């Protein structure tokens, strides 16, 4: 009888997936298991594999032919439809790692522990199950090296899965650290997709583990319902900090979905200047230039040099759309500014001597938008002049903000576009990714 193929999930998530010809399909991101009262061991039903375009797809274990030699080999038949977790499925990395459990040691003593890794093995022809758990007793730091038996806090044990209780259901403060570690290289939009697929409790745990800046970036990429759910689950002070870290237009859109009393509670906790910007944005209809605009575009005075302008647009925190245009105004240079003078496109900045002032190369041909301009008017202006951003000014000519093409796309795409971002629209209809 051949020795069963064995693997630890923590190791699997570092492996690339190949087809029989040796071409790379993607990379393992998680393992999907199901629990059944009639089975002693949870069944491994497939892998979550990240393929080109950061899309996560499901590869059944029946299509995995080998997990050896530092790689996963499949039959080559992969359904490219985006993975969607079903109610009876559990993700090992996302939901079981760091889970508090109870384990029975070889001495027969039952101790508290935390799951560090899960061992799976092939027990039949492409039949895989959860066989072992690598756990840390108590809440101490794990030790390196081989597992040791013992009951001291922080010691590690390798135990049969039959000796573990609480793996399926746990309410004991499961950590999200290992999940975030596995996805630390993802862009906010891709991490948002991962978080969207989690159950609400796990989603809240992951949100709590992210720092304010990262959480703000992720929330901006989530569907509206998820945004509201996550913000509602945060303490008021933390929710206010996250809103401050968001782009003002996105924060205002999110606030608009909350009850008035909750809006005011959060605005009171925010920095006064940040809150003032959001209060102003909330006065505009969401489908107008005022409702679409951000209050924090790149703004410089006319005397600023081209070198200074290029230094400003290189700032890492600026989105690509905002970095494409510098808006030139009289002082004060925070919205609402002094008189708006014109704008300078980044290509023009790159063609001019760095010591020249930006006030000498202004584009004054594009008429600024009033805050009441409709979504259709904004879209036509951007398309007509092939622009990435447009200025929004009040009746006195003060710059209020700027509308960028990404803001417009958010509003003209279907409401559920974030949930179906891998679908392709063709003249014949929607083709699922």
Image (cartoon, grey):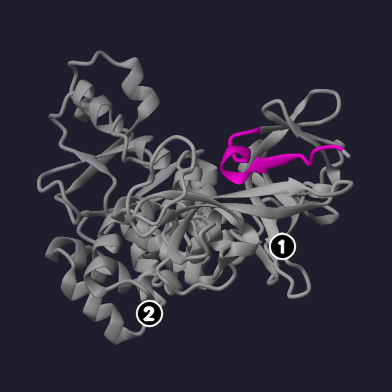
109 left or right of 43 in image: left
Where is residue 404 shown, x and y percent of the image? Answer: 42, 48
Where is residue 392 shown, x and y percent of the image? Answer: 32, 54
Q: Residue at x 50, y 61 (%)?
A: 222
The residue tagged 1 is 41
Image disc number at residue 377: none
Figure check: 414 above or below 283: above
* Quarter of the image where one finds residue 252: bottom left
Figure check: 112 above or below 387: below
Callout 1 environment at 10 Å: few (<14), some (14 to 19), or many (20+)? many
Residue farthest left in this picture? 331
Figure check: 347 above or below 364: above
- Look at the numbered disc 1 and give the secondary structure of its residue: loop
The residue tagged 2 is 258
The quarter of the image holding the N terminus is: top right
Give the number of marks: 2
**Marks 2 and 1, Cα distance to the nearest angstrom?**
44 Å
Q: Residue at x 41, y 60 (%)?
A: 175
Q: Is residue 316 covered in magenta? A: no
- Look at the numbered disc 2 and give the secondary structure of its residue: loop
95 left or right of 160 in image: left
Q: Which residues are magenta?
A: 2-15
**Which sits in the foreground, 109 or 422?**
109
Q: Residue at x 64, y 33 (%)?
A: 15
- Return the disc, 2 or 1, that comes first in the chain's sequence: 1
Residue 381 in sight: no
**Which sits in the foreground, 166 or 227?**
166
Where is residue 282 shown, x and y percent of the image? Answer: 31, 72
């Amino acid at each position: 009888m051949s020795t069963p193929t064995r693997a630890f999930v923590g190791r699997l998530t570092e492996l690339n997936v190949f087809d029989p010809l040796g071409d790379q399909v993607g990379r393992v991101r998680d393992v999907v298991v199901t629990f059944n009262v009639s089975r002693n061991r949870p069944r491994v039903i497939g892998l979550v594999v990240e393929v080109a375009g950061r899309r996560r797809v499901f590869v059944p274990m029946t299509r995995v032919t080998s997990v050896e030699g530092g790689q996963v080999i499949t039959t080559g038949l992969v359904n490219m439809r985006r993975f969607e977790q079903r109610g009876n499925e559990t993700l090992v990395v996302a939901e079981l790692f760091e889970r508090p459990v109870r384990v029975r040691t070889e001495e027969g003593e039952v101790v508290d522990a935390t799951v560090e890794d899960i061992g799976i093995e092939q027990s039949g022809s492409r039949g895989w199950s959860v066989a072992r758990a690598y756990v840390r007793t108590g809440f101490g730091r794990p030790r390196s090296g081989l597992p040791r038996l013992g009951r001291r806090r922080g010691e590690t044990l390798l135990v049969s899965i039959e000796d573990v209780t609480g793996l399926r259901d746990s309410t004991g403060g499961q950590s999200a650290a290992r999940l975030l570690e596995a996805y630390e290289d993802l862009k906010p939009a891709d991490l948002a997709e991962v978080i969207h697929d989690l159950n609400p409790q796990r989603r809240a745990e992951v949100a709590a583990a992210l720092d304010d800046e990262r959480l703000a970036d992720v929330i901006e990429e989530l569907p509206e319902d998820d945004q509201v759910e996550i913000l509602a689950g945060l303490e008021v002070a933390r929710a206010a900090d996250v809103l401050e870290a968001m782009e003002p237009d996105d924060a205002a859109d999110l606030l608009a979905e909350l009850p008035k009393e909750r809006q005011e509670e959060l605005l009171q906790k925010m920095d006064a200047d940040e809150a003032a910007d959001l209060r102003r944005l909330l006065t505009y209809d969401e489908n107008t230039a005022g409702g679409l605009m951000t209050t924090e575009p790149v703004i410089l005075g006319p005397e600023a040099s081209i070198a200074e302008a290029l230094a400003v647009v290189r700032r890492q925190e600026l989105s690509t759309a905002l970095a494409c245009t510098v808006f030139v105004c009289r002082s004060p240079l925070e919205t609402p500014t002094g008189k708006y003078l014109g704008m300078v496109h980044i290509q023009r900045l790159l063609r001019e001597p760095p010591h020249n002032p930006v006030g000498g190369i202004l584009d004054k041909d594009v008429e600024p938008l009033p805050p009441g301009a409709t979504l259709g008017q904004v879209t036509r202006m951007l398309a007509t002049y092939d622009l990435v951003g447009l200025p929004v000014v009040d009746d006195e000519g003060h710059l209020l903000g700027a509308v960028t093409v990404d803001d417009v796309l958010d509003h003209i795409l279907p409401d559920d576009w974030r949930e179906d971002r891998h679908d392709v629209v063709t003249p014949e209809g929607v083709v699922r990714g």
